[in-house]
């Protein structure tokens, strides 16, 4: 009687297990089919992201004669009409550092001060006009030397993601991606880069004057005893900064208002800028 009961229970479970298996197979089928459809859509919307199309394009380019392919660009202005002699003149003394600033006409005076200081150090300058007003800058002597890009109500990182691709800015040794309201009375770009190069800093920012307003993190304040610092010590507050600290806000931190990237650092950082939210993660 016991054996018959066990066998009967097992027989009753078979239809139930069959239903479960059928449901699982259906779910797997629908999931696989959905993923396949999404892959097809992605390949149509973003054909350059697919390895198949990428390898096909690469093989097509390889068949072209040597000297035709130019994988990189830059932001250097070129004369509309050029001759062989004028081309050589354009390349002489060209800048290898870039200043990029999102600007609005309300900060025109301060931006003028910033740009003049950087142009004196042979920087290339690109202005991202988030308010759409370009004509208001034409009276400045250096306006024609700068590159102007317009997009209403967009962030610094939105512009950077779309117009500062690593392949476009590869000729620049350092990229200054600054806010428009920074004071530069005591700042010297050339001297700053001397320190950056000598210390091998890949991502950095100029320190803030201790008397500046709007200081959010102590690590950004200038240390009067040293020409640069990588960490800050602070035993006050909820976060204790000591030699054992391994992350922000004690060390390894650069504020988003005035970052300076080396070429290799920007090649990495650009990929971390989120397209959808226009922010840097």
Image: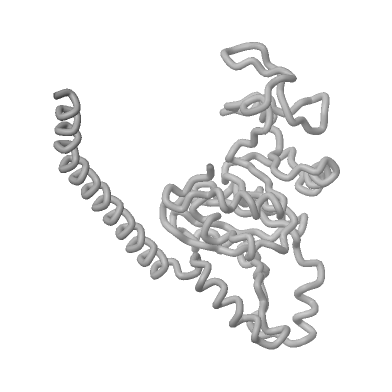
Q: Position of residue 88 (x, y in %)?
A: 80, 79
Describe residue 67's horizontal placement relative to residue 102 as left or right: right
Give the color scheme: rainbow, by chain, secondary structure or one colour: one colour
Q: Is residue 59 placed above or below 259 in the rendered structure?
A: below
Observer-nearest of 140 and 125 = 125
Q: Position of residue 146 (x, y in %)?
A: 62, 63
Q: Is residue 51 placed above or below 24 in the rendered structure?
A: below
Describe residue 171's horizontal placement relative to residue 104 as left or right: right
Describe residue 125's horizontal placement relative to residue 88 as left or right: left
How many numbered tags mark residues here? 0
Q: Position of residue 23 (x, y in %)?
A: 22, 47
**Rendered residue at 73%/45% (across/down):** 202
Observer-nearest of 139 and 47 = 47
Q: Is residue 225 placed above or below 24 in the rendered structure?
A: above
Quarter placement of the N terminus: top left
Observer-nearest of 141 and 239 = 239
Q: Residue furthest right?
A: 198
Figure quadrant of residue 221: top right
**Rendered residue at 17%/40% (across/down):** 16
Figure quadrant of residue 57: bottom right
Q: Position of residue 113 (x, y in %)?
A: 66, 48
């Amino acid at each position: 009687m016991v054996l018959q009961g066990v066998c009967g229970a097992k027989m009753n479970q078979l239809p139930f297990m069959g239903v479960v298996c059928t449901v699982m197979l259906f779910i797997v089928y629908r999931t696989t089919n959905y993923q396949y459809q999404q892959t097809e859509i992605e390949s149509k919307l973003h054909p350059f992201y697919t390895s198949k199309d990428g390898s096909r394009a690469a093989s097509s380019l390889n068949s072209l004669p040597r000297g035709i392919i130019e994988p990189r660009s830059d932001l250097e202005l070129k004369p509309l009409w050029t001759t062989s002699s004028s081309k050589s003149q354009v390349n002489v003394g060209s800048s290898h550092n870039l200043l990029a600033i999102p600007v609005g006409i309300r900060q025109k005076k301060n931006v003028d001060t910033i740009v003049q200081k950087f142009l004196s150090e042979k920087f290339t300058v690109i202005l991202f006009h988030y308010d759409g007003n370009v004509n208001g800058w034409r009276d400045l002597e250096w306006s024609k030397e700068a590159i102007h890009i317009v997009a209403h109500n967009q962030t610094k990182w939105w512009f950077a993601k779309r117009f500062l691709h690593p392949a476009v800015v590869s000729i620049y040794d350092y990229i200054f991606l600054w806010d428009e309201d920074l004071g530069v009375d005591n700042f010297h770009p050339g001297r700053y880069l001397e320190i950056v190069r000598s210390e091998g800093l890949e991502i950095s920012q100029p320190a803030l004057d201790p008397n500046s307003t709007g200081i959010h993190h102590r690590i950004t304040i200038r240390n009067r005893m040293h020409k640069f610092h990588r960490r800050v010590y602070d035993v006050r507050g909820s976060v204790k900064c000591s030699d054992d600290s391994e992350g922000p806000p004690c060390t390894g931190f650069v504020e988003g208002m005035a970052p300076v990237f080396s070429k290799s650092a920007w090649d990495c950082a650009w990929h971390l800028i989120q397209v959808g939210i226009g922010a840097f993660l």
